[in-house]
Image (cartoon, grey):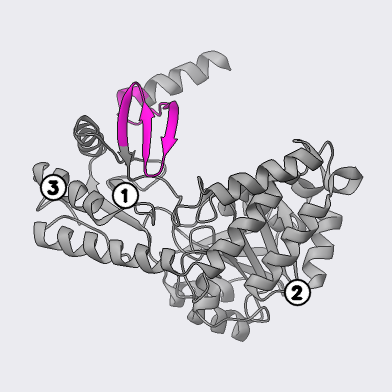
Amino acid sequence: MLQRLAVQTDGRAQTQLYRRLRTVTRAEGPFVESNGKRLLVFCSNDYLGLAQDPRLIAAWKQAADSSGVGSGSAHLICGHRREHAELEEVLAEWTGRERALLFSTGYMANLGVMQALLQRGELCVQDKLNHACLLDGAQLAGAVLKRYPHTDVESAERQLRSHDETCALLATDGVFSMDGDIAPLRELAALCARENATLMVDDAHGLGVLGDDGAGSVMEAGLSEREVPVLMATLGKALGCSGAFVAGPTALIEGLIQFARTYIYTTAMPPALAAATRCAVTLARTENWRREKLQVLIRRFRHGAEQLGLPLMPSRTAIQPLLLGDAQAALDASRILEAQGLLAVAIRPPTVPQGQARLRITLSAAHEEAHIDRLLDALASLRLAGAPV
């Protein structure tokens, strides 16, 4: 088995698809230090610039002083602390749901939800560009997984009608992690209402960024808990912390506590992390200037990219993919930018489809306009105009 794995790994290296770890030795605002070099980062998911906010750090320290570091156990044993319960209440209220339940990661949340909701042989319909954990969750649950072309509601309808089972789950990203575009949530909600299907939205990249107070893509679309009964979002992106939660009606949350194996059989997140995240939620909700600034930066970048004729994909979110097509071209572009002090990682298959390698450029409220201009100047030097779009 190890020999086979080594051969497969070598194959990745031969096709320019080999993944390498990068060690960051210091982080300071939108900059990191790696391999002795200071780099301006355009690949972080810290969309609101909260990850290093001193108020989050103070909340972590205060909770760690009183509660220690690790929770010591699973939630259902003795690991569910006051900090966890308080964070769940805040998240439920923010997203307009009855209840919320914390998970250690977004991957575990999606696997746990699908394993609890879907029975073997039931239908799960998903967008083809959904995050890997949604796809894995359906497969591990033994569901019949059917995928529709990206954001194609008519195809989703045909997939739902193709199965005789009375129970069906339609799952979609709210904001797609590699393309940055937003799912047609209103249309999907209307479809699920017509077909008596349950709608699940993974809003990992929408929470904190979209909506009047950052409550995410579902709230921006004006959809209630009745229309989107299953909402998952992560705490490690716009909120600058780590972990995830599922929010919805009490029946969903109580069911997950009973049947979601990735919740039942894992250690609860550190209570200090929950305290820091609660602080982050407060800041994300009240400091609207962060979202406003982010939108200014997005518009500045897109305007500059358009003037340069760059092959930028359509997106109004913090994720701004620059489609280059060839994996080697994406690698070369990333390396040239790094030589100029900029970090924008190349995303290649299998993370994205064949022929759609790209630079996944992400913007943050921690950036300044001068940083955007520096990035645009560096991209202009790559002479990418005319690359595939």
**Quadrant, the C terminus:** bottom left
**Which residue appears at 77% of the width and 44% of the height?**
268
Given the image, on which type of amino acid does mark 3 rest? Answer: Asp
Read off the residue under disc 1.
Answer: 361
Task: Give 310 or 348, whichever is nearer the viewer.
Answer: 310
Which residue, given by chain and number where applicable, does mark 3 sit on?
A: 377
- Spot occupied by residue 286 in the image (x, y as percentages of width and height): 54, 69
Question: Observer-nearest residue: 320 or 389?
Answer: 320
Q: Which residues are magenta?
A: 13-39
- Residues tagged 2 and 1 counted as in contact (Cβ below 8 A): no
Report crowding for label 3: few under 14, some 14 to 19, many 20 or more residues within 10 A (C-alpha).
Answer: some
Q: CA distance from mark 2 to mark 1?
A: 35 Å
Which tag, 3 or 1, sits closer to the chain's start? 1
| Residue 33 on the magenta span | yes
Residue 356 x/y as whole percent: 29, 48
Q: Is 26 displayed left or right of 285 in the figure? A: left
Q: Residues within 10 Å of mark 2 (few under 14, many from 20)?
A: some
Badge 1: residue crowd in 10 Å (few <14, some 14–19, many ≥20): many
Q: Is residue 118 left or right of residue 326?
A: right
Three-letter amino acid code at the position of disc 2: Glu
Circle nearer the viewer, 3 or 1:
3
Which disc is residue 98 wearing? 2
**For residue 171, which quarter of the picture?**
bottom right
Q: Nearer the viewer, mark 3 or mark 2?
A: 3
